Amino acid sequence: DVERLHFAMGQRDSDGKLSVVAVERELMNHWQALFAEAELRPHQMLNEGLALPWSEGEWSLLLQED
C-alpha cells in the first residue's frame, strides 16, 4: 500500500531518469525515533542500494528477507 511507504528521490541523470527509494513509513519513523533518543540529527540517510555495483545499461538489485 503506497500510503504506508516513505519515498526519497535522488538526482536526475543526464537522460532525465530519476532514482527513487521506498521504505515502510513505520520503519522510517522507528529509525528517526532512535536517532532522536540518542540526540543525533543526521543530515541524510542512505540506503544499502547505493553500495551495489553499477554498470551502465545493467540492473543492480538488492533482495532482503523480512
Image (tube, rainbow, N blue to C red):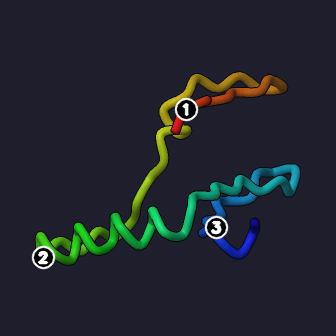
Q: Residues within 10 Å of mark 1 (few under 14, many from 20)?
A: few
According to the image, label 1 marks what residue?
64
Q: Position of residue 31 (x, y in %)?
A: 34, 64
Query: Could you tell me how far apart the alpha carbons at marks 3 and 2 are, in whole angstroms?
Result: 25 Å
Q: Position of residue 28 (x, y in %)?
A: 45, 66
According to the image, label 2 marks what residue?
39
Amino acid residing under circle 2: Glu
In contact (CB < 8 Å): disc 1 and disc 2: no
> Callout 2: helix, strand or loop?
loop
Q: Residue at x 81, y 51 (%)?
A: 14
Q: Nearer the viewer, mark 3 or mark 2?
A: 3
Q: Residue at x 75, y 68 (%)?
A: 2
Q: Residues within 10 Å of mark 3 (few under 14, many from 20)?
A: some
Q: Nearer the viewer, mark 1 or mark 2?
A: 1
Specify which label sits upstream in the sequence, 1 or 2.
2
Q: Residue at x 57, y 58 (%)?
A: 23
Depth check, front residue: 34 or 41: 34
Amino acid residing under circle 3: Leu
Q: Which mark is residue 5?
A: 3
Specify which label sits upstream in the sequence, 3 or 2.
3
Q: Residues within 10 Å of mark 2 (few under 14, many from 20)?
A: few
